Image: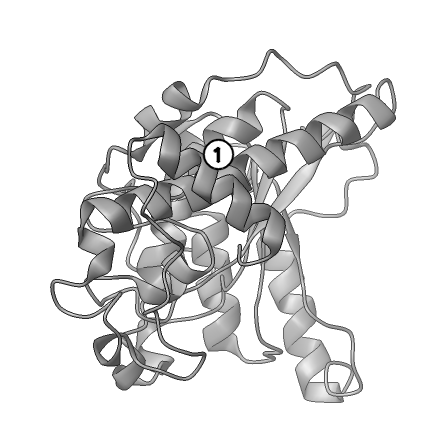
């Protein structure tokens, strides 16, 4: 947001808000700084002040509006085609357990303990009947460096819960190349947080596995991968008819009317994540 156009846009917005003296933050540190080493993200930092809150709201709202505009153009382009639109939301899980959520805020996800930064995105996607695609589904907190205060499991649960509460479909992917049962079991749990349904259909709309490689096709790894794929389908045999599987693609309809930003921001009210089982029922 530091190019000349967004600088001018911020100045205009700040002036309209009665603060022509406000500038974009210059105290947020550099790429490899820890939050506590910066004035913006440190204890009682700028992010907690009126100026900081104004900037973060402006920044995140601009990105949500931009995403909304891009999806609207995509909807026009693919109108009537048998496709589903989707938007990928990044999994910024490091510093999730720090008060400032510095990595998320830097990326434009204005998410704090008292503010949900993801459900407004899901609400925006709902007008396009679009899928929210999230990452790091294979990660567990115990595998992360404690110094980074990383919490991928809690982040996944928050984002997915918010999307399901907004009644949109959720898809996912793994962030790292993994070939082990621990990662596969975590993916299975996130795809089906409360076990299989009567028809064996996962709660998650779809999953993209990353990635095809020589390591994946090594004998032991590939045998385990085939088991994982079968478990993702609740041990059901291959179904060639998408309609029977509940995934029939229908012609894309025109997006619903634009949702006012005030209504999107109503979704920032934090809510407890939906219940998650401790472990998958389909190991």
Residue holding disc 1: 122
Secondary-structure class at tag 1: helix
Q: Is residue 221 left or right of residue 117?
A: right
Res 283 visible: no
Residue 185: x and y, percent?
47, 66
Q: Quadrant of residue 264?
A: top left
Q: Residue furthest top?
A: 257
Res 268 visible: yes
Question: 103 or 237: which is nearer to us?
Answer: 103
Residue 28: x and y, percent?
34, 69
The residue at 87%/24% (across/down) is 81
Q: Which of the colour schemes (rainbow, by chain, secondary structure, one colour) is used?
A: one colour
The residue at 45%/75% (across/down) is 182
Q: Residue furthest left?
A: 44
Residue 204: x and y, percent?
54, 42
The residue at 19%/44% (across/down) is 114
Q: Check the image and report above or below for 271 versus 113.
A: above
Question: 43 or 179: which is nearer to us?
Answer: 43
Question: 157 or 35: which is nearer to us?
Answer: 35
């Amino acid at each position: 947001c530091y190019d000349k156009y967004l600088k001018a846009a911020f100045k205009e917005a700040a002036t309209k808000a009665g603060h022509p003296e406000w500038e974009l933050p210059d105290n947020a540190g550099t790429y490899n700084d820890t939050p506590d080493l910066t004035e913006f993200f440190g204890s009682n930092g700028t992010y907690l002040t009126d100026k900081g809150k104004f900037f973060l709201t402006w920044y995140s709202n601009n990105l949500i509006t931009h995403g909304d505009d891009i999806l609207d153009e995509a909807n026009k382009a693919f109108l009537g085609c048998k496709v589903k639109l989707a938007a990928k939301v990044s999994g910024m899980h490091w510093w999730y357990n720090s008060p400032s959520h510095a990595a998320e805020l830097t990326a434009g996800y204005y998410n704090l303990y008292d503010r949900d930064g993801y459900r407004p995105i899901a609400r925006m996607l709902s007008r396009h009947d679009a899928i929210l695609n999230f990452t790091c589904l294979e990660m567990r907190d115990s595998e992360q460096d404690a110094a980074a205060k990383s919490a991928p499991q809690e982040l996944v649960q928050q984002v997915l819960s918010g999307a399901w509460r907004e009644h949109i479909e959720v898809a996912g992917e793994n962030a790292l190349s993994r070939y082990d049962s621990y990662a596969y079991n975590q993916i299975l749990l996130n795809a089906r947080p409360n076990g299989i349904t009567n028809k064996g259909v996962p709660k998650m709309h779809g999953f993209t596995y990353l990635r095809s490689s020589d390591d994946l096709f090594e004998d032991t790894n590939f045998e385990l991968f085939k088991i994982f794929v079968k478990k993702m389908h609740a041990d059901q045999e291959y179904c060639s008819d998408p309609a029977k599987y509940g995934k029939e693609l229908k012609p894309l309809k025109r997006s619903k009317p634009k949702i006012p930003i005030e209504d999107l921001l109503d979704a920032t009210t934090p809510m407890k994540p939906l219940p998650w089982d401790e472990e998958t029922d389909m190991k």
